[in-house]
């Protein structure tokens, strides 16, 4: 659906083309387009001159002599088309304005959701469609903020509230996603849980984004174009909307897509954290650092415990997943066949693109499993060796990062019978964001009581 920047682009295109044109006749081919008296609509406009084209929110106003005004909304895919061709009507043309100079203004609408309403200069702003609209989202003033703050402090998802045209008008699906991403707010966050300061930040980011979109002629998305042969360019700089599966430019996490109020919604789970999800403890660290022992201890403390390696192995056993991995590898794969597993490892070591494709496929499946378990249990502890690589930080309230000396790491690996001849296994320098407040460092030196003491301090803090 065209939003405020696209509608602004439409009127900027129309103004130089149709202002001053006199109407010879009007033909309506789809009666439901006209929301006022259809028998009055066309005849009233004959011999009238177009004086101006204006806009409020997503509504277009065409001003005629005789103090007449058409209120129009493009809805999903409606568009105005100015032409001088001799046979201007097309398959999806809903109405046609014939001008005395031989030119035409068509309203084309493949979905047939657009509307027009004939009224007067005196009454058009008082029309219920217009009167209920909130302040334009790119023109919010300080005096508008108390109303906006109060209206957004509701027990509804902020994404739904931003689409409510009675609060701020002009924001649709595209610019709601972009605004929430810029403000680092999860789209499912309840409006009542957002601070006044953050709401003010939302209004500021909305203005910046909408003004930039207007400058670039709006967004040409799917089948919407502001006019025939005219495309906006804002879609070229969209940071979030429609980029499901792409990497977030801020943190490298893959953008997710969910549905909020029936609308597709794209967001970055690490930049736009769902704080209701933040209740689990994540355990990570280099090989042989004591992750399994930490998980066992948390299980004794009453935490529902999960091991990601075990979950991934179970996923690999599902026939359709096994088949997909084999397809990516271009080789047979079976997690319970050591020779095939070793062959898969060799393929991925030698081909980083294949390795990335395998990870891009399996990580979202693992992610889905983990989120379900977190939602289903009050106390959850999860061992996630590749927590940071998979960008799963957002799932956890606390992340225990185990640190270990190389000497102790060798002892631990030898104790469990691992071959430690390969230096690649001895990765005691585990990379993580040291500024992340969720991270709690636990040092392991072979003393289990010392390990348990550190964990107790973390869970009891």
Image (spheres, rainbow, N blue to C red):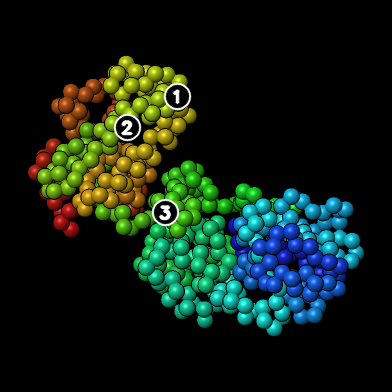
In the rendered structure, are the residues bearing label 3 and label 2 in contact, judged by CB atoms less than 8 Å apart? no
Question: Is 397 left, or right, of 262 in this rendering?
Answer: left
Mark earlier in primary sequence (3, 1):
3
The residue under the point 38% across, 34% down is 362
Number of marks present in the image shown? 3
Question: Which quadrant of the figure has residue 63?
Answer: bottom right
Label 1 to label 2: alpha-carbon separation: 16 Å
Looking at the image, which residue sits at the far front? 39
The N terminus sits in image quarter: bottom right
Label 3 to label 2: alpha-carbon separation: 28 Å
Mark earlier in primary sequence (1, 2):
2
Q: Is residue 202 above or below residue 394?
A: below
The C terminus sits in image quarter: bottom left
At mark 2, the secondary structure is helix
Label 3 to label 1: alpha-carbon separation: 33 Å
The nearer-to-camera label among 3 and 1 is 1
From the image, tell me which residue sits under label 1: 327
Residue 403 seen in the current view:
no
At mark 1, the secondary structure is helix
At mark 3, the secondary structure is loop
| Crowd band around label 2 with a 10 angstrom C-alpha radius: few (<14), some (14–19), many (20+) | some
From the image, tell me which residue sits under label 2: 315
From the image, tell me which residue sits under label 3: 271
Looking at the image, which residue sits at the far left? 449
Along the line of sight, the residue nearer the viewer: 33 or 185: 33
| Crowd band around label 1 with a 10 angstrom C-alpha radius: few (<14), some (14–19), many (20+) | few
Question: Which quadrant of the figure has residue 285?
Answer: top left
| Crowd band around label 3 with a 10 angstrom C-alpha radius: few (<14), some (14–19), many (20+) | many
């Amino acid at each position: 659906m065209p939003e405020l920047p696209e509608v602004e682009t439409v009127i900027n295109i129309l103004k130089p083309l149709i202002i001053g044109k006199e109407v010879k006749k009007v033909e309506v081919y789809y009666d439901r387009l006209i929301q006022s008296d259809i028998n009055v609509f066309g005849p009233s406009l004959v011999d009238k001159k177009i004086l101006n084209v204006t806009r409020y929110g997503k509504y277009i106003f065409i001003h005629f002599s005789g103090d007449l005004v058409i209120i129009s909304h493009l809805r999903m895919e409606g568009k105005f088309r100015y032409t001088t061709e001799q046979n201007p009507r097309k398959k999806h043309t809903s109405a046609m304005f014939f001008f005395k100079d031989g030119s035409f203004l068509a309203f084309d609408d493949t979905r047939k959701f657009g509307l027009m309403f004939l009224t007067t200069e005196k009454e058009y702003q008082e029309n219920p469609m217009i009167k209920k609209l909130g302040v334009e989202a790119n023109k919010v003033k300080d005096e508008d903020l108390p109303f906006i703050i109060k209206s957004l402090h509701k027990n509804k998802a902020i994404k739904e509230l931003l689409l409510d045209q009675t609060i701020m008008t002009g924001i649709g699906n595209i610019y709601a996603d972009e605004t929430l991403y810029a403000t680092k707010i999860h789209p499912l966050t309840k409006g009542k849980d957002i601070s006044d300061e953050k709401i003010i930040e939302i209004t500021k980011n909305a203005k910046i984004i909408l003004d930039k979109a207007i400058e670039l002629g709006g967004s040409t998305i799917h089948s919407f174009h502001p006019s025939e042969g005219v495309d906006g360019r804002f879609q070229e700089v969209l940071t979030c909307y429609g980029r499901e599966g792409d990497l977030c430019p801020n943190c490298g996490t893959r953008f997710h897509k969910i549905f909020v109020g029936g609308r597709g919604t794209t967001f970055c789970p690490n930049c736009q954290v769902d704080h209701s999800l933040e209740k689990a403890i994540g355990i990570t660290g280099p090989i042989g650092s004591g992750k399994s022992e930490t998980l066992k201890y948390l299980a004794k403390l009453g935490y529902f415990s999960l091991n990601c390696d075990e979950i991934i192995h179970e996923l690999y056993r599902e026939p359709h997943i096994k088949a997909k991995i084999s397809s990516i590898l271009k080789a047979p794969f079976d997690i319970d066949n050591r020779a095939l597993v070793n062959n898969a490892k060799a393929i991925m070591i030698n081909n980083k693109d294949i390795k990335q494709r395998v990870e891009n496929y399996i990580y979202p499946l693992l992610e889905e499993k983990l989120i379900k378990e977190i939602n289903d249990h009050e106390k959850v502890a999860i061992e996630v060796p590749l927590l940071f690589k998979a960008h799963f930080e957002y799932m956890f309230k606390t992340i225990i990062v185990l640190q270990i000396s190389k000497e102790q790491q060798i002892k631990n690996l030898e104790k469990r019978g691992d071959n430690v001849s390969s230096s690649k296994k001895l990765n005691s320098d585990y990379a993580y964001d040291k500024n992340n407040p969720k991270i709690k460092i636990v040092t392991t030196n072979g003393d289990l009581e010392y390990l348990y003491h550190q964990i107790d301090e973390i869970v009891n803090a």
